[in-house]
């Protein structure tokens, strides 16, 4: 349990550290994700470089040891330069080139593929990282460079002095490490990328649900469904429609007696109840503006009793106003007007 908690803490700390290094207010979420993943790739290589360097030192391979041990200082210098210059493309190129070339140089120093325990496999981290956090074009470039490194190593392998001071246990250990190391980095990169993408997807999904809820709140469900399906505008003709217009009487005087907060609260309370009334009667709220409330019947679903339905709505609204007005000690009165006939319902425009 302790190990799992420590691992999770370290994992989250590395993610947060990579984000802090690359933070830029002008970057999109996708660009930020790519930058932080690139830094994370570089950081994950560093512990392995230190361990490999220590093993080579113990085996008295000082030249070979100097190569991985130089990685971390070069990484720190590259990060500092990035923070000062704000040139991510330079940081990315230098970092990928280091991870690509250092294993090749180490392979040469140790005497070839077999003598170095296939350390050149670490160069694969460069194209793997590019796939996750760079463009397709750059990914292809770095993969081609990796292929070139492997081919070059194979070409010169026979001319190298394959004798070195590594004991058998070190060779075997490094073989396993050279397989597990790049594989582990690829695994962590995928976890990070999937995790960040999931977070972004959840945010998009949350905003989509909010937008749909807002759309459903202001438009009839049938019209909202058509807009969600991609219809840019809706214009439907109805031969028999009734529209109710309700306007509060004496709202100016009432507004002078109440504070702005009290007036808004009262209107919100009234219109919330009106919303419930319209739902009960199956009619469609069209809009509210100030102290005005507009309802329609016969749209978007045709109904023969459109006029009668709005009369019943108006009567229930009137009864509610009488009851609520007596409760708060203020006269609440509205004028109701109903007009019937043909109509065209339109949803359009750019906003």
Image (cartoon, rainbow, N blue to C red):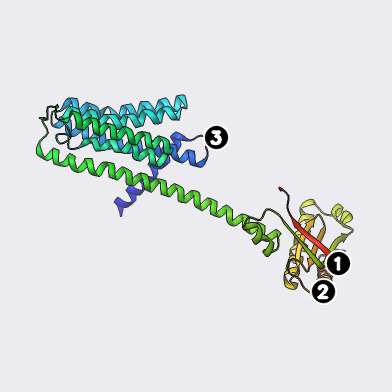
Tell me which label, 1 or 3, sits earlier in the chain.
3
Q: Residue 140: give x, y in percent of width and height.
A: 37, 37
Q: Picture quarter containing residue 73?
A: top left
323 up-or-down from 289: above or below? below
User: Does residue 349 show up?
Assistant: yes
For the point 15% across and 28% down, the residue is: 61
The residue to which callout 3 is attached is: 26
The residue lying toward the viewer, choosing from 351 and 261, is 351
Q: Secondary structure at mark 3?
A: loop
Q: Whole-Å distance between the Cαs marked 1 and 3?
A: 54 Å
42 up-or-down from 327: above or below? above
For disc 3, the neighbor class at 10 Å (few under 14, some 14 to 19, many from 20) is: few
For the point 79% across and 65% down, the residue is: 238
Specify the label residue 341 is tagged with.
Answer: 1
Q: Picture quarter containing residue 42?
A: top left
Q: Secondary structure at mark 1?
A: strand
The residue to which callout 2 is attached is: 312
For disc 1, the neighbor class at 10 Å (few under 14, some 14 to 19, many from 20) is: few
Q: Residue 226: give x, y in percent of width and height.
A: 66, 60
The residue lying toward the viewer, choosing from 152 and 247, is 152
Q: Residue 345: give x, y in percent of width and height.
A: 77, 60
- Name the side, left or right, on which 337 lies relative to 66: right
- Name the side, left or right, on which 199 lies relative to 329: left
Tell me which label, 2 or 1, sits earlier in the chain.
2
For the point 68% across and 64% down, the residue is: 222
Q: Residue 248: give x, y in percent of width and height.
A: 86, 60
Q: Secondary structure at mark 2?
A: helix
Quadrant of the frame with the N terminus: bottom left
From the image, state whether disc 2 or disc 1 is nearer to you: 1
For disc 2, the neighbor class at 10 Å (few under 14, some 14 to 19, many from 20) is: some
346 up-or-down from 11: above or below? below
Q: Whole-Å distance between the Cαs marked 2 and 1?
A: 18 Å
């Amino acid at each position: 349990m302790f190990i799992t908690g420590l691992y999770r803490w370290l994992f989250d700390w590395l993610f947060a550290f990579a984000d802090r290094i690359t933070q830029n207010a002008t970057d999109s979420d996708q660009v930020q994700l790519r930058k932080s993943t690139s830094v994370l790739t570089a950081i994950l290589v560093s512990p392995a470089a230190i361990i490999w360097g220590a093993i080579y030192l113990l085996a008295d391979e000082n030249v070979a040891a100097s190569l991985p041990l130089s990685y971390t200082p070069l990484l720190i210098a590259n990060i500092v330069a990035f923070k000062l210059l704000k040139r991510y493309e330079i940081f990315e190129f230098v970092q990928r080139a280091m991870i690509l070339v250092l294993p090749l140089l180490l392979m040469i120093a140790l005497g070839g593929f077999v003598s170095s325990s296939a350390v050149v496999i670490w160069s694969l981290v460069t194209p793997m990282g590019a796939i996750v956090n760079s463009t397709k074009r750059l990914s292809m470039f770095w993969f081609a460079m990796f292929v070139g490194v492997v081919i070059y190593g194979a070409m010169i392998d026979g001319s190298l002095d394959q004798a070195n001071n590594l004991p058998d246990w070190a060779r075997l250990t490094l073989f396993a490490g050279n397989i597990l190391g790049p594989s582990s980095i690829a695994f962590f990169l995928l976890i990070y990328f999937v995790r960040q993408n999931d977070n972004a997807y959840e945010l998009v999904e949350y905003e989509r649900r909010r937008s749909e809820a807002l759309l459903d709140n202001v438009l009839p469900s049938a019209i909202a469904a058509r807009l969600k399906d991609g219809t840019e505008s809706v214009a439907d003709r109805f031969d028999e429609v009734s529209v109710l217009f309700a306007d509060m009487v004496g709202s100016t005087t009432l507004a002078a007696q109440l504070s702005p907060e009290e007036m808004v609260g009262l209107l919100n309370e009234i219109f919330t109840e009106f919303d419930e009334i319209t739902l009960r009667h199956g009619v469609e709220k069209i809009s509210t503006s100030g102290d005005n409330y507009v309802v329609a019947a016969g749209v978007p679903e045709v109904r023969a009793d459109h006029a009668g339905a709005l009369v019943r709505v108006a009567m229930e609204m009137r009864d509610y106003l009488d009851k609520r007005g007596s409760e708060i000690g203020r006269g609440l009165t509205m004028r109701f007007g109903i007009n019937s006939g043909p109509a065209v319902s339109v949803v359009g425009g750019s906003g």
